[in-house]
Amino acid sequence: MDKKATGIVAYISIIGWLIAFLAGDKEGAKFHLNQALIVDIGMLICSALSPIPFVGFIFGLVDIFLLVCWIIGLVAAIKEEEKEIPLIGAIKILK
């Protein structure tokens, strides 16, 4: 996969991220792989904590924020831009 396809597939889900990481252009799309991983981990944490009564409401709001971040990241990958997602985009997991 080329840089653009790798970036787009990375945002699809955790499985899409794994496919992009294993089969895609890691160096060219490292920025979007990192951004998508941050959003995916955040969504997994929110999904795990959402059944808890009061905490679930808070993490439900965080999940909506992460959905907006996911959309921003996906649009940036489609346009081949390296635009950080708000608030959490500076976190670097992949070096």
Image (cartoon, rainbow, N blue to C red):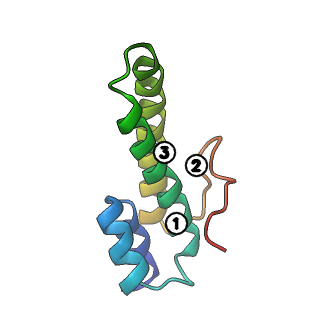
Farthest top residue?
A: 54
The residue beneath circle 3 is: 42
Contact between labelled residues 1 and 3, with CB atoms less than 8 Å apart: no
Question: Can you say which quadrant of the picture contains the C terminus?
Answer: bottom right
Q: Is residue 72 visible?
A: no
Identify residue type, mark 1: His
Q: Nearer the viewer, residue 25 or 58?
A: 58
Contact between labelled residues 1 and 2, with CB atoms less than 8 Å apart: no
Contact between labelled residues 3 and 2, with CB atoms less than 8 Å apart: no
Residue 24 picture quarter: bottom left
Going from the N terminus, do you reach mark 2 or mark 1 first?
1
Above or below for 46 versus 61: below
Going from the N terminus, do you reach mark 3 or mark 1 first?
1
Residue 60 on image: x %, y %: 40, 25
Residue 85, label in figure: 2
Q: Is residue 20 visible?
A: yes
- Residue at 60% across, 57% down: 83
Q: Nearer the viewer, residue 43 or 79?
A: 43
